[in-house]
Image: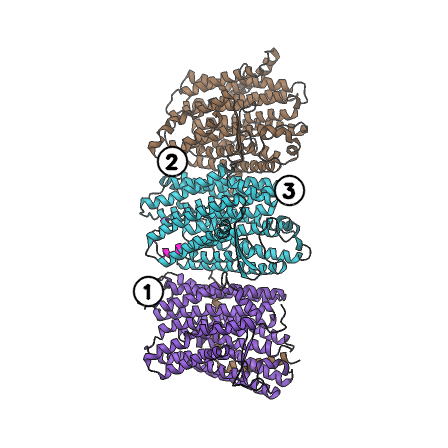
Chain colours: A purple, B cyan, C brown
Amino acid sequence: MTTEALALIVFLPLLAAAGAVVLPTAWLGLSIRVGLMPLPLLLLIPTLEVLENGAYRIALAGHSAPLGIAWQLDPLSLLMLWLNVGMTLLISLHANCSFRPGQPHAHRFWPLWLLLFAGMNALLLSADLFNIYVTLELVTLTAIGLIALEGKPPALRAAMRYLLLALLASLLYLLGVGLIYGQTGVLDLYLLAERLAPGWLSVTAIALMIVGLLIKAAIFPLHAWLPAAHGNAPGPVSAILSAMVVKVSIYLIWRLWFWGVPEWDLDRAALLLGVLGGMAIVYGSLAALVQQRLKLIIAYSTVAQLGYLLLLFPLASTLAFQAASYHLLSHGMAKAAMFLAAANILRSLGTDRLRHLAGIDQRLPLDVFALALGGVSIMGLPPSGGFLAKWLFLEAAWSARAWSWLILIALGGLLAAAYLFRVLAVVCLHPRRRGNHRHLKRTPDTASLAAMLLAVGAIIAGFTSAPILDLVEAGLPPGLPR
Amino acid sequence: MMDQLMFWTPLLTVIVSALTGIVIFVAGERHALLRIILNLAAAIAKLLLVVMIGLLVRNGFTPEFRVSLVPGLDLVLRADALSMLFASLSAVLWLVTTVYAIAYLERSPNRARFFGFFSLCVAATMGISMAGNLLTFFIFYELLTLTTWPLVVHNGTATAIRAGGTYLRYTLSGGALFLVGLVWLYGISGPQAFVAGGTLADHAVDARLSLQIIFVLLTIGMGVKAALFPLHGWLPKAMVAPAPVSALLHAVAVVKAGAFGLIRLVEDVYGADLVADLGLDLPLLLIAAFTILYGSVQALRQVDLKKRLAFSTVSQVSYIILGIAIGGPVATVGGIVHLVHQGLMKIILFFCAGIFANLLGVKRIDQLDGIGRRMPWTSTSFTVGALGMIGLPPVAGFVSKWYLGAGAVEAGRTWVVAILVTSSVLNAAYFLPVLKRIWLHPPPDQWPHEARVSRLETGSLVGSAIVAAVLSLGVGLLAGHPLSPLNWVDSIVAGYFP
Amino acid sequence: MSAVLAVVLPLTLMLLFPAPERYRRLAIALTPWSGAALFLPLLTRPEVAFSWPLLGVSLRVDEVNQPLILLTAVAWNLSAWFAWNTIERDRRWFWSGWLGALSGMSLLLLAGDIASFYIGYALLTLSAYLLITHEHNPQAWRAARVYLVMAFVGEAAILSGILLLAGTIGNADFASFTGHHETLSASPARWLLLAGFAVKMGIMPLHLWLPLAHPVAPVPASAILSGVIVKAGLMGWLRFVPGLPEDPAWIGWTLIWLGLFTAFAGVVIGLTQERIKTVLAYSTISQMGLILAAFGLTILLPDQRNALLALVGFMALHHGLNKAALFLACGSSLALGRIGTVLFALPALSLSAFPFTSGYLAKNALKAAVHHTPAEILGVVLALTSTATALLLWHAWQIARHTRTRNPSLQPSWALLVLSGLVLPWIWAAGHDLIEPVKIYMLWAAVWPLILTAVIVAAAVRLNWRASGQIPEGDLVVLVEQLAGHLPRLLAQRERRHRPHSHLLDRLHQLQGFFEHHQRSVQATGLAALLLIGLLWLTLWN
């Protein structure tokens, strides 16, 4: 039963994508519904299974490890799956407005969108390195397709740059996979721990894979592709890219780090990654502070926020794990909300340059509100998921007596406040000329509602953390200190 | 049934205002009448609710609402005597300010946004007053920052935006330090429920230095809002906000939140004894004393009426901190009761300053000449507030000053009396010339900018000011009455100094 | 109830003043008579206490405040009558101050506890400001400014003292003060209170405001300022700083010499003045010095304390009535011929201790008190004060003769006040056992100072003495004002240089190009990736 459900989770969107391509336009709506709607229900089945019995493993094609291709669902990947499904559904609500079947780009958007969805689900389930590579490639390529979808020159340029760097990243990752396979003869992530001894080859392999993933995760100083790509992509695409796609790469590094090579002496490398994270936080925030376009600000904010996820490595404790997961979750919702709101603003205003935003809150109150609520979570102000994540991070830093991280985290919130309030301040500024926004296009209510739902979700995450944190705790790698 | 009541009522006080705010947002700009009715109804409902809880607390109940955020980390709203003091102050002044604000903002744009955030701001204040532990306090404290910011920048001018920026720079930085201190404290001793006398005495030996640093961090975090020197910079700048906001910022919500937090910190988290033991009371006292003088001297230099009032706030709020820093029951009573007294008196002054500015365009002190003949009732209210600030009886300010001075002597810090007296003289030096202009100078031929307003509007504006004036005279004159804030505070402090 | 009425009635009337005309009619009708309520407590001698207003209020009439209440009731009502007939412009201004001051004065006189006293005192101080500024000419504003500054210096000292007391004994009842000897004598509060109240009394060198403020006020206001309101300070002393059994003699001596210095210095400066009201104001300073000396004696001679305290009250009554009468004379014009002369001369003679006047009674009693004590020498000095006072009042008379007032009229209130100045102290003295049997040497003791005065006056007229070099009104205040002139400059807000806000953000904006450049370069990212691989390799490799 669980196996079938999991298979459906991957293949249903895949089928729907195929259907979206093959079937006539009139059937597009149906394909979309089939590819998306049943997923939460389907996911319930493995959820119950995992909650009851712990990690669930499937050997595909009948072979068991080390030979076969395996899927594994543990609490952490379950959480990620839920996140992906929920987020994609909500964002699809928005996408359904901007890419309503019958509209210009809809017939290209939906297949790619569904493909991305399927790829993400598969990626999260995969337990073996090569399988991960394939799905990762699928995700990246569909993402690039989505960015370039509307064919605007800046978007095309951004997509091109993304493509180049993603190829480099894939190459590095694949090289690493190859080296590991040569060394151990297995590709299963969960078997590496016992088979992969630290040697110069395996070290090289791990380093290559991590850097490859870091490029895909757009971690400073490898973030060059992200702001342009996320800043120029269509709204729903920016949202899902920032909320889920980049983070999956970091999730994979976690996997590699804590499940793949837990026995290694990782302190110095962890420090390095932590420093990278810190630099990302500072650099991304400062860059966001000087941007003149709303979507670019949000994109740079993603660069900054991703840095927090790397702080898990030096802190390496249960608390830090909970913190990072929670941050992933709340940032995902908040960032998606912000991108959707920004997309609505861009759509009705025709521009997202800051100086044109003055007084916009009178015209698009719901979107501005969503933007602000998402901002609250990003800044880590209570009550919001972002605050709880920050609290957990601080607590973890305190427990480790890691004062510098503690200061960095506190400072990061302030920097985020600086660039976000810059936006809100402009919004509150009275327009110099009345009737500045007379020619606004109306945004569909559903589009605003989707943004609002996500934003409210990010806030509500500040109140109901216990089930999620318990889930994370259940899925921790072995041997992690409290 | 009773249990349910006990559980939900504290949350209800917060929800009432928060919901009002949200409904106002949703209703939007057009439904003015709905908004007015909703505002007033919610304010009255809140007042009744607070009175009800007050009665419960008086009869020995402690209603408590509790929900877990993170395992081991609870959001607790609990009504104890001290929280009821602050809650009733905000509930009363909210009602008054609502009436005032409705009239004040008549015909100005963006009213939905204003009143929405106004209500949210009050919800946050309620949360602060009912907070049952330091984390809850922090949550609502930050929420207050968030909800007051749109009010500060409400005018939408470049100056307002800059002022809002300054406000955020101060408060959010303070909040960050607060959070660090909070996490640290949590690491040392778990969640900090507010318990009279504090809960940290056990850690005084092994974590002495930590506790000291944490105290400093938390004090900075709260001191920003309480406008302790040198963290007061935002307050005068925030004067660009509309008058009801200034009134609320200065009299009730923001500065009081900081001061209230410091009371909680000193009395309910650390405990006055531990603070003294850690050697922290004297530095706090010195800062408060310096702020008192500094604010007064700065106020003397201002020519803008609202700026002068702002610096006066800087000075006056530190009385509260002075009171708790002195220690000893009498001074503590003086400090805590000043929370109420200052709120009542300051709100009059800001109401009046707003009326002068709104109806006659008078903003600078030298434009006030002879305004007493034009607006006798407003000017009388202003006079009451100003005299109270100086500490002249029978206005409430005198009672606070009396207790502070007596408490300082009782605690063996006689020099504080000199500070109090100097401050009184300085207060007189910057308020009496204003009063002189108001009453004794001949009025000009033409006022700067005379607005045409309806009688109802003028009535609401002036009426609110008069109500506030009557209240501050009342709590001063009836200080000895069993139901007065003074006696309420007396019973609170009795818990601190058994 | 009568005590409450005496306090609340004037205050209520005052608060009714901003009300529209039609509600005010009753208030206006009652205004001049509101002081009459003060007679009631004298008759009923109430003692009441309320727990709820402020920090608790108690009101009472006892031995200490009785003479002052009598003085206030008489002088205030008669002056009010006078004012009702003479004050024509800015009546609202004047009567607000008048009623406020009356309410404050009544409260401080009747107060039985610290806080109530202070409330009354503060109300009095502020309301008197309105009386002083009533003329609103530049002189009045200057005088009022000096008054207010000095009043607040005094108020500050008093507040400090009161707070210090409150810290140790709470809002104590005055009756319980004797139970706190040790606290009181050890505390600096005592000195602060002494100094603070001395400001109101015009004791040198804290008298600065008095010679400026008393003359600029309207005539009836001057009368109560000089006659009654200065006694508020005395009341403060009597209530707050009673002599204590263990007081060393030097305290007494200090006060006595300070008082006598004030008494003589006031006369000396007064003699150089050319305006009658200023001369009278200096006379007030001088007389208050005398009262201070008497107060000092109560400390120096503890065994005669009760008698001396009664005497101090008597002196206050005598001086208050007579000085008020003298001030009213300034407004009633002396061009009224013989009647005017008599009405001026009677209080003047009384103040100069002419035999069988109330002043004579007071001086006699004082001399009798110091007789056969370590302070015996004071007998002569006290006699000389009579000479001095007489000289000064002669000087006043000289000026008064040459002053023309516009509408000469004989105000009945003036005549009544002169009469009560003659009669009431006698009745009072009779009731309080202050009348000594007439002895010839005492009579002589009273007469020779006046003969001395006559001699000096004669000599002065013959030799055409004139005061060389005039001392400006308010003497020291001129110096202080010059010093204070620099203060506003220090306090004035300097123009801030306009500085661009937020340097940091500007710097960051310059970096924008950098961010954008970095964002474009794929190669740089590739290089960075290689570098990172190397770093990661190194850190992973042990």
Q: Are marks 2 and 3 in contact (CB under 8 Å)?
A: no
Q: Are marks 2 and 1 on the same chain?
A: no
Gap in Å between the C-alphas at discs 2 and 3?
A: 45 Å
| Three-letter code for the amino acid on which mark 3 is drawn | Gly
Chain letter of the residue beneath label 1 in the structure image: A
> How far across and down, in percent of the image, does residue B411 sit?
63, 42
| Vertical arrangement, residue C257 with respect to residue A354, above or below | above
Pick whichever, A165 or C37, lies toward us.
A165
Q: Which label is found at residue C268?
A: none
B105 in the magenta segment: yes
Which element carries disc 1, helix, strand or loop?
loop
| Three-letter code for the amino acid on which mark 2 is drawn | Pro
Q: Say if residue C309 shows up in the picture.
A: yes
Residue wearing tag 2: C18
Q: Relative to residue C480, is residue B29 drawn left or right?
A: left
Pick whichever, B447 or A394, lies toward us.
A394
Which segment did they paint magenta? B103-115
Residue wearing tag 1: A436
| Three-letter code for the amino acid on which mark 1 is drawn | Asn
Gap in Å between the C-alphas at discs 1 and 3?
A: 65 Å
Chain letter of the residue beneath label 2 in the structure image: C
| Vertical arrangement, residue C210 with respect to residue A230, above or below | above
Residue wearing tag 3: B412
> How far across and down, in percent of the image, does residue B87 sit?
49, 48
